[in-house]
Image (tube, rainbow, N blue to C red):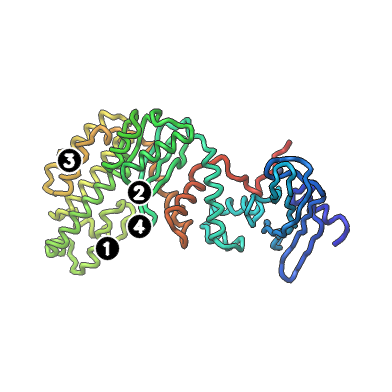
Amino acid sequence: MSVGIEALFTSALGLAAPWGVAKVDLNTKQRRIDFEVRCSVKLLACPHCGCAEQRIHDRLRRSWRHMDFFQFEAWLHADVPRVACTACGKTGQVGVPWAREGSGFTALFEALALALCQDLPVKQAAGLLRCSDKHLWRRIKHYVDEARALDDMSAVEIVGIDETSVRRGHDYITVVHDLEAKRLLFATPGKDHTTVQAFAADLEAHGGAAADIKHVCQDMSAAYVKGVEEALPNAVISFDRFHVVALAIDAMDTVRKTELREQPQAVIEALGTEDRKAIKGLMWGMRTNPIDWTVKQTNVMYWLQRSGLKSARAWRLKQALRAVYAIAAQTNDPKRAREELDKWLSWARRCRLEPFKKLAQTIKDRIEAVVRGMTDNRSNAYVEAMNGLLQQAKRAARGFRTATNFIAIAYLRMSKLKHLPAHPFAPVALK
Ligand SMILES: [Zn+2]
């Protein structure tokens, strides 16, 4: 290495006195670049009490992985001084400016890792960085905890509460979003009413006030209703479109499955095909939007609609509820929404399909919250968008999907945290 290269890397690594690069070792075969960093002074401040000009007791050898320089894997090495303090009597290792205490990565490497994990599955980010995903998960948790500790929730007034699961049907997580700032505020294992209390406590711990929450958008779960009534005393509840329509789809599915099980012959005759497996597949069209139907599905749905099957009635009821929501969204008029919903409810009550009669009763019991949710398009759209992001967060935790990891990556990606390390490749601001 020529003279001056150490000085060049000292500034490239952002080091300042008393730290500087003493030696650069480039190994092209191993594609590795090693920096020997040295502390040039004999006296240092005590890391415990801050007392200046203390004697260095000894030095401990340590190494840190840094961001690659070009295609070379970069490592920093230093004999880190330990100071024997005459003031407090303790002996302690001084901190290094390029890494946080106890980490084997430099701060810039960690910042790059976090930036990659915002967009890539953690396992894939680990592959690109050539480190273990276990190490990345530990850092994600560390920085998310640190950033959340400084998070400000004082302006939160409108929230959405929803449940998701770490694995399909297992390990439920309750998530709370700020529907105005469009970010994830809180996530915790479980889906009972205590999760809402836990949210209220977390909100208060971050400068918010449970009494300031004016509006909660949620699904029709009785547990969340109870939780909101107990923990968020001034909030009105609205049930979002997504979940109410999902209940209608569930009711329709129950009708369809029961009919196929109890009266298979009637279904076969109406749809003109014998193959039960094919029928099952084609009746999947009942769940999807007509414009997405395949030719075969279009055919089956044609015969279904002209049949006297209970499934046909169930499908019409589900479509009609969708239409009620569409009218509510177009007119944005709560009175009109209520009228349309009342018409639907009276049909559903008289339809002689038990699952729909039950659903009609559920909706009727909480009609005001349902109607409020019908014209609340902003929340409706947001709940659906958030669901998409949660699915991505789930995929990002593939291979290491615990509730803790899922929650950590969801916070990293969806909370718009202001106190995370800056992206190391962010453009330098012009002065
Ligand atoms: Zn001291």
Q: Name the quarter showing ligand 1.
A: top right
Placement of the C terminus among the 4 image quadrants: top right
Amino acid at the residue labelled 3: Gln
Q: Secondary structure at mark 4?
A: loop
| Residue at image point 11% right, 43% down | 350
Query: How far is the residue under mark 3 from the one under mark 1?
Result: 31 Å
CA neighbours of label 1 inside 10 A, class few (<14), some (14 to 19), many (20+): few
Visible residue check, residue 3: yes
Sooner in the amino-acid sequence: mark 2 or mark 4? 4
Query: How far is the residue under mark 1 from the one under mark 2?
Result: 34 Å
Is residue 214 left or right of 34 when viewed as pictured? left
Q: Which residue is mark 3?
A: 361
Q: Does the closest atom of ligand 1 sit within 8 Å of the Cβ of label 3?
A: no
Query: How far is the residue under mark 2 from the one under mark 3?
Result: 27 Å
Q: Which residue is mark 1?
A: 281
Q: Would you identify the image quadrant in which residue 75 lies?
A: bottom right
CA neighbours of label 2 inside 10 A, class few (<14), some (14 to 19), many (20+): some
Q: Nearer the viewer, mark 1 or mark 2?
A: 2
Amino acid at the residue labelled 1: Gly
Sooner in the amino-acid sequence: mark 2 or mark 3? 2
- Of 382 and 37, nearer the camera is 37
Placement of the N terminus among the 4 image quadrants: bottom right
Amino acid at the residue labelled 2: Gly
Query: How far is the residue under mark 1 from the one under mark 4?
Result: 21 Å
Q: Secondary structure at mark 2?
A: loop
Q: Which residue is mark 2?
A: 190
Q: Does the closest atom of ligand 1 sit within 8 Å of the Cβ of label 4?
A: no
